[in-house]
Image (cartoon, rainbow, N blue to C red):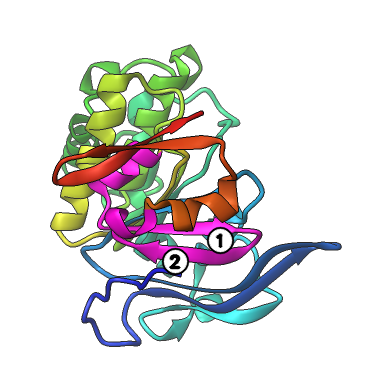
Amino acid sequence: MTASTGSGNHPTSGLRASQVELSYGSTHALRGVDVTLSAGEFRCILGPNGSGKSSLLHTLVGLVQPDAGKITLDGNALSDLSPAKRARSIGFLPQEIHPAFSFTVAEAVALGARVAGHGSWFDASPDDETQNAIHQALATVEATHLAERRLDELSGGERRRVLLAGVLAQEPQFLLLDEPAAMLDLHHQASLFRLLKTLAQKGIGVLCVTHDWNLASHFADELILLHEGRVHAKGVASEVLTDSTLLPVFGENYELIARQNRPPVVIPK
């Protein structure tokens, strides 16, 4: 197992999973997982299907309770915090969202802005502060031109960007994303990961599940490889992208292409 890169922060700070165990019936989803996300870090979780990636995110945002171990936010048990406090602290973009109502893009992003305290839930129309927050969030994901469109009129990739804008409008301390680049074209994939890197540099802790090793290795500060519910390896890309780490997980179904002074590229074989 490769060594983790430490953040140097106080050990109780940040969002932490400590010895987390989670099962669904007879299926062990997580086995003794330790993961810490501190302010200003951009970490990516990778691994085969069924390795526990989404389950880990769900425990970190409080959607499911672990069978053992604990989740803490700045030293406080996540389960002890109010839903409002969790929503203001942790923004979460799941793999799929199917809105129950046909909101316009601006209306959908306004919901996130109101979580952050902009405007009132009872306002018939957004005030200037809320409008500002909506515009800024949409501009961040290159979706300002979609403001008056309805969510059910958008392509899958456009909807992902808009939903991310809604999460960013919450102004969270930590941002957790499950396959955020799914359905995005090459331009918007790179743009999204560049944005996540920038958000981390501005002080947000970012934790992203992805199957794209090359995007992760290029932008993330640390890779976390899950296998059969355990942390198999974690570290910088050059530490994790090695045959000794990947072979036990993926067999010989991949190839590493070396590059000078940069992490190798991973391709299927």
In this view, the residue in front, 45 or 176, is: 45
Q: Which residue is identified by label 2?
A: 86
User: Is residue 215 left or right of 179 when viewed as pictured?
Assistant: left
Residue furthest right in the image: 26
Q: Residues within 10 Å of mark 1 (few under 14, many from 20)?
A: many
Magenta-drawn segment: 213-240
Pair 1/2: label in front: 1
86 or 204, nearer to the observer: 204
Q: Residue at x 21, y 56 (%)?
A: 200
Q: Nearer the viewer, residue 124 or 200?
A: 200
User: Relative to 178, is 91 above or below?
Assistant: below
Residue drawn at x 44%, y 66% is: 86
- Whole-percent x, y for residue 16 in the image: 43, 75
Q: Which residue is mark 1?
A: 56
> Which amino acid type is marked by label 2?
Arg
Q: Which mark is residue 246?
A: none
Relative to 108, is 53 on the left or the right? right
Counting from the top left corner in percent of width and height, residue 176 is at 41, 53
Q: Position of residue 53 (x, y in %)?
A: 55, 53
Is residue 218 located in the magenta-colored stretch of the structure? Answer: yes
Amino acid type assigned to the residue bearing label 1 in the image: Leu
At 36% from the left edge and 73% from the top edge, which residue is drawn?
A: 3
Q: Whole-Å distance between the Cαs marked 1 and 2?
A: 16 Å
